[in-house]
Image: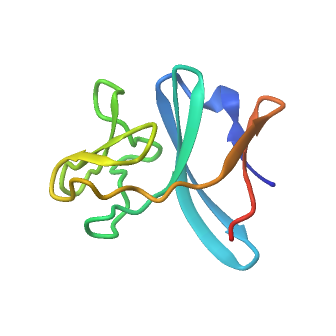
């Protein structure tokens, strides 16, 4: 397990971007908390491959209800990463395996 951030770093709803090196592999991702649940995804839009954030750690729309791509305004469900608005409906963000333990968020081993 690799530490991403302290759980207190996340608002509810809120998001936090991270960049980690794991086994020589760069992992660019973000975590989102909503209603006490935490989810993690790679920071790569399925439509263009571009990062989703336009401001550091800002991955949610103004209402905090959906993940939003800053490049072309695609919107994704927080719980599943599925695109529900924009140019890539039905496609999904790539989920990352995480665990919340001792008030911190950890990235689990990648396959």
Q: Position of residue 20 (x, y in %)?
A: 66, 63
The answer to whether 108 appears left or right of 72 in the picture is right
Q: Residue at x 49, y 37 (%)?
A: 15
Q: Is residue 94 above or below residue 14?
A: below
- Measured along the vertical axis of the image, is residue 47 above or below residue 41? below
Q: Quadrant of the C terminus?
A: bottom right
Name the side, left or right, on which 73 lies relative to 28.
left
- How was the colour assigned to the protein in this rendering? rainbow
In depth, the one of 75 and 21 nearer the eye is 75
Please provide percent x and percent y for residue 84. 24, 44
Numbered label tally: 0
5 to 41, vertically: above or below: above
Task: Kindly identify the residue that appears in the image at 35 percent across and 54 percent down.
Answer: 52
Identity of the residue furthest to the bottom in this view: 24
Taking the spot 37% from the left edge, 46% from the top edge, the residue there is: 55
Going by the image, does 14 lie left or right of 91?
Answer: right
- Residue shown at 42% from the left, 37% from the top: 78
Specify the quadrant of the image occupied by residue 33: top right
Furthest residue toward front: 90
With respect to residue 98, does 28 lie above or below?
Answer: below
Residue 54 position, x and y percent, is: 33, 51
Q: Quadrant of the N terminus?
A: bottom right
**Residue 98 x %, y %:** 68, 47
Q: In the figure, residue 9 lies in which quadrant?
A: top right
Foreground pick, 99 / 102: 99
Image quadrant where residue 2 sits: bottom right
Q: Left or right: 56 with respect to 73?
A: right
């Amino acid at each position: 397990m690799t530490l991403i951030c302290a759980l207190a770093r996340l608002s509810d709803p809120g998001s936090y971007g991270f960049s980690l090196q794991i086994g020589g592999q760069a992992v660019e991702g973000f975590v989102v908390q909503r209603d006490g649940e935490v989810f993690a995804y790679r920071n790569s839009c399925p439509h263009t491959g571009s990062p989703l954030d336009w401001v550091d750690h800002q991955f949610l729309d103004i209402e905090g209800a959906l993940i939003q791509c800053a490049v072309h305004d695609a919107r994704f469900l927080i719980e599943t990463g599925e695109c529900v608005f924009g140019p890539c409906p039905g496609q999904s963000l790539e989920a990352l395996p995480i665990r919340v333990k001792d008030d911190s968020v950890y990235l689990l081993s990648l396959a």
